[in-house]
Image (cartoon, rainbow, N blue to C red):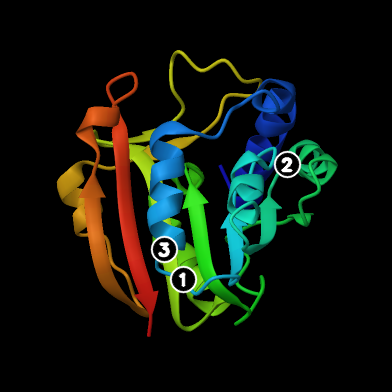
Amino acid sequence: MTTNEHRDTLRAAYDFDAPRRDNNVFDGWRAEIVDEFLARLEPGGSVLELGAGAGQGAVYAEAQGYVLTAMDLSPANVELARERGVDARVGDFTDSDFFVGEFDGVFAMNSLLHVKKALWSTVLHVIRRALRPGGIASIVVYGGISHEGTLEEEWTDPPRFFAFYTDEDFANLPTPGFRRIACEFRHGDSEEGLHPQVLTLEAV
């Protein structure tokens, strides 16, 4: 599958799933991780969320006084986020021209797990370009196993692509342009055999 086919399939899957995602509640461990991320920023800082879905996470951060820009591949999700009052835009975070040098922080909550493993460094480059020097990135994915491809039990039409990493592989991913602050594995928040992996980085 080419990069464009991969992107178009993922966009169609999330357009299909948008009505269900509109009912999601942003709380629990997701909120805890975003709280930890925001605590590293100056109050009122500018934040970019990559793969923002229907905007619940952006609304959560905005309620704490931060200025949010949300980006998602799915036009249906972006429309739902805008209905929540979020500054949401359609975009692809493998696009190296996306939002250069504007933000104090970038967070991606379970969105980079749809990126092909070969494109990891490309996405890190995009995130680095979006941050000012000293800006903070929080990257959260599900993982704990090694996998790349669709899942047998997938419900979206078309099926989504997933890239999962073992904890060891995730801890050893390259982070060009960044200083590592922390790498955390939240085994107590496992879902369907996978657990959140959290990488916190500072742009240098």
Q: Residues within 10 Å of mark 1 (few under 14, many from 20)?
A: some
Q: Earlier in the sequence, mark 3 or mark 2?
A: 3
Q: Residue at x 73, y 41 (%)?
A: 74
Q: Residues within 10 Å of mark 2 (few under 14, many from 20)?
A: many
**Residue at the spot of label 1:** 41
Q: Is residue 116 shown to the viewer in this render?
A: no
Q: Residue furthest left?
A: 168
Q: Secondary structure at mark 3?
A: loop
Asked whether, in this view, residue 36 is left or right of residue 78, the answer is left
Task: Kindly report the distance in space between the C-alpha atoms of the residues bearing marks 1 and 3.
Answer: 5 Å
Residue 96 found in image quarter: bottom right
Q: Secondary structure at mark 2?
A: loop
Query: Residue 126 versus residue 69: which sits nearer the camera?
Result: 69
Mark 3, mark 2: which one is toward the viewer? 3
- Amino acid under disc 1: Leu
Mark 2, mark 1: which one is toward the viewer? 1
Cβ–Cβ below 8 Å for labels 1 and 3? yes
**Residue at the spot of label 3:** 39
Q: Secondary structure at mark 1?
A: loop
Asked whether, in this view, residue 88 is left or right of residue 66, the answer is right
Against 144, is 7 above or below? below
Assign the C terminus to one quadrant of the image: bottom left
In the image, residue 113 lies at what x, y percent?
A: 44, 43
Q: Residue at x 72, y 28 (%)?
A: 18
Task: Kindly report the distance in space between the C-alpha atoms of the residues bearing marks 2 and 1.
Answer: 28 Å
Assign the N terminus to one quadrant of the image: top right
Q: Earlier in the sequence, mark 2 or mark 1?
A: 1
Q: Residues within 10 Å of mark 3 (few under 14, many from 20)?
A: few
**Residue at the spot of label 2:** 74
In the image, residue 159 lies at what x, y percent?
A: 57, 24
Query: Residue 122 versus residue 59: which sits nearer the camera?
Result: 59
In the image, residue 30 lies at what x, y percent?
A: 44, 39
